[in-house]
Image (cartoon, grey):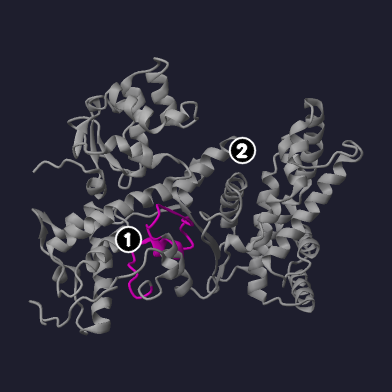
Amino acid sequence: MNNSNGVNFRFRRNDSIGTADAESDDKYISDCFIETGDLDALLDFASPKRIIVGRTGSGKSALVRKLREVEENVIELPPQNLSLAYIANSDILKFFEAAGVNLDLFYQLLWKHVLTVELLKNKYKIKNEDQKKSFLANLFSSINKDRSKEQAINYLREWGEKFWEETEYRVKELTTKVESDLKASLGPTMGDVKLDFSAGKKLSEEQKQEVIQHGRKVVNQIQIKALSDVIRVLSEDIFNDPQKRYFITIDGLDEHWVEDSLRYKLIRALIETVRSFQKIRFVKVVISLRVDLLSRVITATRDSGFQEEKYESLYLKLKWSKSQIEDLLDLRIAKLVRERYTSRAVKLRELFPNKVGKTNFLDYLTERTFYRPRDAILFVNACLEHAEGRNTVTAQCVSDAEGEYSSKRLVSLQEEWGATFPNLTRYTHLLLRKPASFKFSLISKDVLQDLLFSEFEDDLESHDPVIRAISDLVVNGKGTTHSAAQVLFEIFYLVGLIGIKPDSTSGTYWSFHNAEGPSSGAIKPSSTAYVHPTFWRTFGTRVAE
């Protein structure tokens, strides 16, 4: 059947314009990539941008994947393949950390060493002992007897014993050496004490100070200086040809490749390492981080001297506009239709209704996303499910799809932010059947009390910030209703559940649009909260006609 645009087809069951994750989106991701300026920034070696930061579904993995497609020399380094769990399981490292020894220098050395050897192994195709010796001999003859560079080569001889081994071998090799040095530093101090986390915690203050002194000496003697010389050799003598550029990409840091407390320290050390590798002009280490993970890393490692402002220039923060979202959907719709029905490039507007209710369809769609490609793709897919057997998607199909989409987006939000806010979904019960916009003053003490005792009656002693704030108000009579509600609503704002209009002269802030939200002092009982349209259906939000 021909529709009004002359396209002869009907939508079939299981039609879609792609999947939720880049890893399994092979059918669409390469042909339907939209250049928003972010890829150009990564490809530009004069640009400091090399840490991709974005929310779930904002296109981080797609960007890394496209980089691998367009550049010849790209080394992929999944954290899951590094055997970093070997560090997590090291009783000796646990003992020294429990005693108070800061191992940050070791973690930085580990990353620098792994990245250095991966670069050299890849460039010189080192696959056996003879190739390694030949490479080092040629390098030594080319550095004009610079003593610091000789030290760098000696470092590579000592620590790069088997360049051709898998990366996990080098992690274990380096860790074993440091373990041995740490253990030897104690001498007879600990007697027959088993060196593990429990023993480190049980040490007396005097013993801890002694262990810290020994451990600090070992860590400070780790060959950071020699490795700095290696980085200089890489820059000046090896990776100095602008025609032969190299990238290392590390994606998947938000997955559970090692337990969280260690993962945060390793990611912080990796960020430090990415920054130090800027000195190598034609090498770029590109990593991707979810916004919530970066926030947790900063919070967990702040005492280790992490100063975020030093790294701002490295961040490539992903943002999408409405027109870019439409361009992406147009490409994917055209590919779906072209493969089965017509060679003509059919666009989104041709197959979807002009309006849903009184709202232009594209506005309706983007208002129900966080301006992220994944959300837009999933909403369109939900609509296509309800258009089976039709040759266009009707406004009723969109409305029918929205209920299921809304419910799934709330589940997805909990998955995205669950590590930071485990009780997020339970908090949202406060938003059920509320108006689409309301003054903060609508949230009374009674409303907060109902939330506390209906959802958290068995958890009143919890360290959860929302439970603490409301419990202090309701049970202990501390604080104000507004201050307790503000703790909750600042979380709602951060994750995207609400927008905030501080006063009548201000615009409405949304976390996915505004890098900086309204200050705490600007939010008053008279400020207005706007429930995000994505969640209207699942919250039963009351929308004025």
Task: Name the residue rendered at 24%, 25% in the picture.
Answer: 441
Residue 51 magenta-drawn? yes
The stretch of residues the image draws in magenta is 30-59
Which residue matches tag 1?
A: 373
Q: Gap in Å between the C-alphas at discs 2 and 1?
A: 36 Å
| Residue designated by label 2 | 304
Quadrant of the image containing the N terminus? bottom left
Tell me which numbered mark, 2 or 1, is placed earlier along the sequence: 2
Q: Is residue 388 left or right of residue 512?
A: left
For image coordinates 57% across by 50% down, the residue present is 267
Q: Is residue 41 above or below residue 8?
A: above
Q: Is residue 495 above or below residue 14?
A: above
Is residue 160 visible in the rendered structure shown here?
yes
Element at label 1: helix
At label 1, counting other C-alpha atoms closer than 10 Å, the crowd grade (few under 14, some 14-19, many 20 or more) is: many
Q: Residue 449: x percent and y percent? A: 34, 24
